[in-house]
Amino acid sequence: QVQLVESGGGLVQTGGSLRLSCAASRGILSMKSMGWYRQAPGKQRELVATITSVGSTHYADSVKGRFTISRDNAKNTVYLQCNNLKPEDTALYYCNADAFIIDYWGQGTQVTVSS
């Protein structure tokens, strides 16, 4: 069992920045990958970014060049640096841990971008 706790969301203006954090209850190195997903009202949950245990990253086209995912294995924490935020980035952002045969999810942190 892994508990994931997200933080860092908030209300920002268009063009602003936020840094989201995801603290895991145990070692993230044992996970296949860690990731961030988001879900806007009335829409399906979508992938934002992932990072593997060896540091390979993948981003949704909509956030490439603006968001950066990183990890601190010593702190069991994954980050999502969100720059140049747009109103369409408004969503509940979830942390995900892919443990090969099971996925773990956090409760989410809200990001709201005003125009």
Image (cartoon, rainbow, N blue to C red):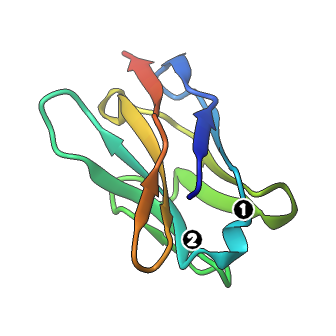
x 66%, y 77%: residue: 30
Q: Which amino acid type corresponds to the residue marked 2 in the rendered image?
A: Ile
Residue 17 disc label: none
Residue density around tag 1, few if under 14, some if 14–19, many if 20 or more, within 10 Å: many
Judged left or right of residue 67, residue 25 is: right
Can residue 82 be seen here? no
**Residue 66, how many percent across, how many down?**
52, 50
In this view of the protein, which residue sits in the foreground, 12 or 24? 24
The secondary structure type at the circle numbered 2 is strand
Q: Which residue is mark 1?
A: 71
Q: Measure the alpha-carbon separation of dots 1 and 2.
A: 8 Å
- Compared to residue 88, the image places residue 21 above or below, namely below
Residue 42's place in the image compared with 76, above or below, is above
Q: Classify residue 62 as left or right of residue 52.
A: left
Direction from residue 100 to residue 42 in the image, left or right: left
Q: Disc 1 on helix, strand or loop? A: strand
Q: In this view of the protein, which residue sits in the foreground, 96 or 38?
A: 96
One can see residue 100 in this view: yes
Q: Please provide percent x and percent y for residue 83.
A: 58, 40
Q: Quadrant of residue 72?
A: bottom right
Quarter of the picture containing the N terminus is bottom right
Give the number of the disc on residue 51.
2
Disc 1 to disc 2: CB gap under 8 Å: yes
Across and down, in percent, residue 109 comes to 49, 29
Q: Is residue 76 above or below residue 30?
A: above
